[in-house]
Amino acid sequence: MSGPTKTMAVLTCAALVMTTAYTVALGSSGWLWFGWIVLGVVTIGMAASDSAAAGPRRRPPTGPGAARP
């Protein structure tokens, strides 16, 4: 994971703790939980795009027609 993705993951965890504390202290708020779910989905999307950006590793060509260094 890259730096921004790690930061987003920490922010998402902190938001979960704050939303849970708010729910325990003052009662449930649907909008807070909805916001946390949206934040979680965005974080998952960032993590997925980070892993997809690297792409699959390709093996060098082999065989009789392969270029040799």
Image: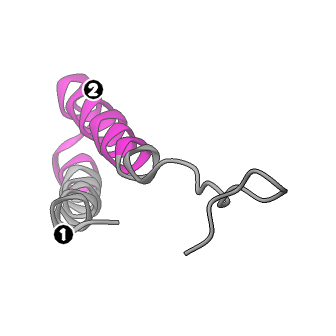
Q: Residue furthest bottom?
A: 69
Q: Which of the 4 image quadrants contains residue 33?
A: top left
In the displayed structure image, the side of residue 69 where residue 46 appears, left or right: left
Q: Position of residue 35 (x, y in %)?
A: 20, 31
Residue at which label 1 appears: 3
Q: Is residue 28 magenta?
A: yes
Estimate the spatial distance between the alpha carbons at disc 2 and disc 1, rounded to whole Å: 25 Å
Residue at the spot 19% in from the left edge and 33% down from the top edge: 32
**Which quadrant is the N terminus positioned in?**
bottom left
* Figure label count: 2
Residue 38, horizontal then vertical, whole percent = 27, 29
Q: Where, quadrant-wise, is the C terminus in this rendering?
A: bottom right
Label 2 sits on residue: 34
In the rendered image, the vertical position of residue 6 relative to residue 28, given as above or below = below
In the depicted structure, whether residue 24 falls above or below residue 7: above
Identity of the residue drawn at 26% across and 46% down: 23
Which residue type does callout 1 highlight? Gly
* Residue range of the region highlighted in magenta in the rendering: 22-49
Q: Residue at 45% of width from left, 44% of height from top? A: 52
